[in-house]
């Protein structure tokens, strides 16, 4: 591994004209053994996460856990309010009337799972990110309009400046640039 903690290089960026070229390049890079890479496109590209090898399942798991906690919390709050904190005997009905708790339990489940999913997605993606090293490449200004980019990062175990540059040039991109930190 040819990494240097003081290296000013973030990675190598290749520019493509179509989403199909980007998808093919990402798949070829993955097949070549590169794991630390990212793709940038002006719109979602179907199949890109599979081509990049993205298999992170933390956000759905955290959302599920948040939903369980929200449901249990909402149910427990209602139980505590109606039986412990403020018990009222209305017409001899039981204090613990669980069918009345279903709507609030459902709403708490949805609310907490949505909040957990949103916050975990933002935190795990490192957002908001007002600055990223790829912004240093002049050609990257077209990433939000009509160009597609693949960046192989310097922290990848297989990364070698010259070999990675040659590999990306072999994918027939419009251009290849080094990304400074």
Image: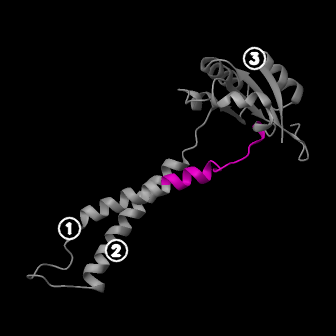
Relative image position of residue 14 (x, y in whole percent): 75, 24
For the N terminus, the quadrant is top right
Q: Nearer the viewer, residue 76 or 41?
A: 41
Residue topped by disc 2: 77
Left or right: where 107 falls relative to 58: left
Where 102 falls versus 3 (above or below)? below
Q: Nearer the viewer, mark 3 or mark 1?
A: 3
Residue at 29% x, 64% y is 104
Relative image position of residue 130 (x, y in whole percent): 69, 48
Residue topped by disc 3: 174
Residue 178 falls inside the magenta stretch: no
Few, some or many residues within 10 Å of mark 1 (<14, 14–19, 20+): few
At numbered mark 1, what does the secondary structure look like: helix, strand or loop?
Answer: helix
Relative image position of residue 17 (x, y in whole percent): 67, 18
Residue at 78% x, 20% y is 175
Between the C-alphas of marks 3 and 2, the distance is: 60 Å
Residue at 12% x, 78% y is 93
Highlighted magenta segment, given as a residue range: 117-134
The tag earlier along the polypeptide, 2 or 1, is 2
Left or right: where 78 falls relative to 163: left
Between the C-alphas of marks 3 and 1, the distance is: 63 Å
Left or right: where 161 falls relative to 150: right
Q: Nearer the viewer, residue 92 or 127?
A: 127
At numbered mark 3, what does the secondary structure look like: helix, strand or loop?
Answer: loop
Protein image colouring: one colour
Which mark, by number, is residue 100? Answer: 1
The tag earlier along the polypeptide, 3 or 1, is 1
């Amino acid at each position: 591994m040819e990494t240097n903690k003081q290296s000013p290089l973030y990675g190598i960026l290749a520019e493509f004209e179509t989403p199909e070229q980007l998808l093919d390049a990402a798949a070829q890079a993955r097949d070549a053994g590169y794991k630390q890479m990212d793709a940038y496109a002006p719109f979602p590209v179907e199949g890109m996460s599979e081509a990049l090898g993205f298999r992170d399942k933390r956000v759905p798991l955290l959302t599920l856990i948040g939903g369980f906690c929200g449901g249990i919390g909402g149910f427990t709050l209602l139980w505590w309010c109606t039986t412990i904190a403020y018990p009222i005997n209305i017409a001899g009905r039981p204090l613990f009337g669980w069918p009345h708790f279903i709507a609030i339990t459902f709403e708490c489940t949805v609310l907490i799972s949505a909040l957990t999913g949103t916050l975990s997605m933002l935190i795990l993606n490192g957002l908001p990110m007002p600055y990223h090293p790829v912004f240093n490449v002049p050609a990257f200004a077209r990433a939000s309009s009509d160009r597609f980019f693949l960046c192989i990062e310097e922290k990848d175990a297989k990364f070698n400046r010259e070999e990675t540059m040659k590999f990306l040039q072999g994918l027939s991109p419009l251009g290849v640039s080094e990304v400074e930190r």
